[in-house]
Image: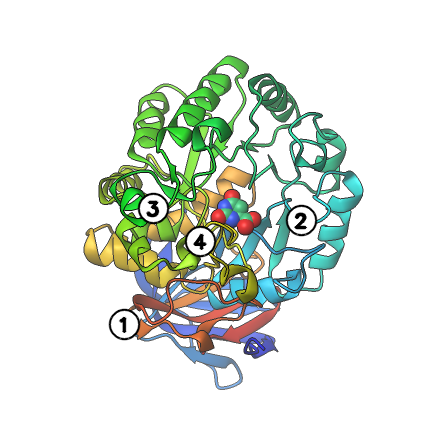
Amino acid sequence: MPGKLQIKKQPKEILLYGGTIIDPVRRKKYKGDVFIKNGKIAKIGNVKKKSSIHQVNCNGMVVTHGFCDIHVHFREPGREDKENLASGSHAALAGGFTRVCVMPNTNPPLDSPESIRFIIKKGEPLPIHIHPIGAITKEQKGKEICEMAAMKNEGATAFSDDGLPVQNGEIMRFAMEYGGMVGVPIINHAEDCQIRNDGVINEGEVSTRLGLTGNPDISESTMVGRDLELSQLTGSSIHIPHVSTAKSIHHIRRIKKSLQLVTAEVTPHHLFFNDTALMSYDTNLKVAPPIRTENDRKELIQAVKDDIIDCIATDHAPHTIEEKENTFDLAPFGMIGLESCFGAVNQVLVKNAGMKLEKLIQKLTVNPREIMGFESDLFSLGAQAEVTVLDPEKEWNFLESNIFSRSKNTPFLEKTLYGKIHMVFSKGNMTKIP
Ligand code: DOR
Ligand code: ZN
């Protein structure tokens, strides 16, 4: 059984005092206090302490916006044994996330207005905000476009067949034209199925040595190239998920100079690991797209620093132990990622690559919210409090007891991470993360 988080109702008045405030919208960092009253931001700066107010000492901590992950798989409906919206929301809170977008590759997929309404209703009582992403095509079969306008009206925030690429270029063109009309981003899982050709890890020296079928980097970059040109042709926005290769970065870098319609994300695992880690045959490292080479990893890090990559998204993909304990060829693609996200990316980008923490925070808060068209100025007076308090320099060992997901499929177990979530304030609750 996963551990249980102690989620408490917020007292009427709370003072987060003595911390370093990072406001990613105003791009400011300063010492100060955050006063939350009736679940809303009531004052930021210097706030007088009163004994009647519940006080939280944030000395040595960073106080910032609640994180937003625009790419998670919560498996409801259909595979609630792996995760449901409730357990997923606990995993999210533990990772500092107050808002997530769930992918539609459930069983059945979220491909109708009714299924979108189902997620919205089920998410309402949960401690974080949950936004459904609708499928691009009916049953994610890649043939018939879903009723995007009706689904958007029910609350679909974007459209994707994630897990499966939209293989047919004409369907992708139509999807982008409709997406543009409806005013939502299209997110295509970019992997050319023919070029991928049943590859289970990156094609290269490691796949040859292990005797596993390889998936070449161009299975991704050729489709990214196609999608960028379709964005140019249709004038519709495209969001490129889980970019994994230097060649894709090359395309995105080139087109971003002239086209404002393109945004891109990277996962913590593509930033943290390279394919030599696969020498362990750990099926928890089997993901789609695959973990690539050290050269790709370095290019991804540089692209984050250069703002070619706009945001971090976990692609949290829970699977059962039974499925993951299969042989490498048969195990499913995916790893969980919410709880370990901040400690992993803060280590790779801030500690090891010298990026500013403020920039990392932008890529976990304001940027993903802007891609999805959510309110992003969370430190304006009167805003509903979505606040994350974190210890930016804590070194800690990621253990099973840190997991709140129903699944445990992660290669981060026993890894030393840098930076830890301390407390999260969301939807009138407060949660201390153990
Ligand atoms: O590794 C992955 N797992 N990549 C995807 O695109 C889908 C996901 C899943 O649903 O398990
Ligand atoms: Zn995914």
> Which residue type does callout 2 highlight?
Thr
Residue, far bottom: 51
The residues bearing labels 4 and 2 have C-alpha atoms spaced at a distance of 23 Å
Residue at the disc numbered 4? 328
Of circles 4 and 1, which is in front? 4
Q: Amino acid at mark 4?
A: Phe
Q: Nearer the viewer, mark 4 or mark 3?
A: 3
Q: Residue type at mark 3? A: Gly
> Is residue 167 something one can see in this rendering?
yes
- Front residue (pair 258, 288): 288
Residue named by callout 2: 106
Q: Is mark 1 in CB contact (under 8 Å) with mark 2? A: no
Could you tell whether 333 is left or right of 211 in the image? right
| N-term-proximal mark, 4 vs 2 | 2
Measured in 3D between alpha carbons, the distance from the residue under mark 1 to the one under mark 2, in whole angstroms, is 36 Å
Q: Residue 10, position in %: x, y?
A: 59, 75
Nearer-the-camera pick, 238 or 323: 323
- Compared to residue 300, the image places residue 364 above or below, namely below
401 and 179: which one is in front?
401
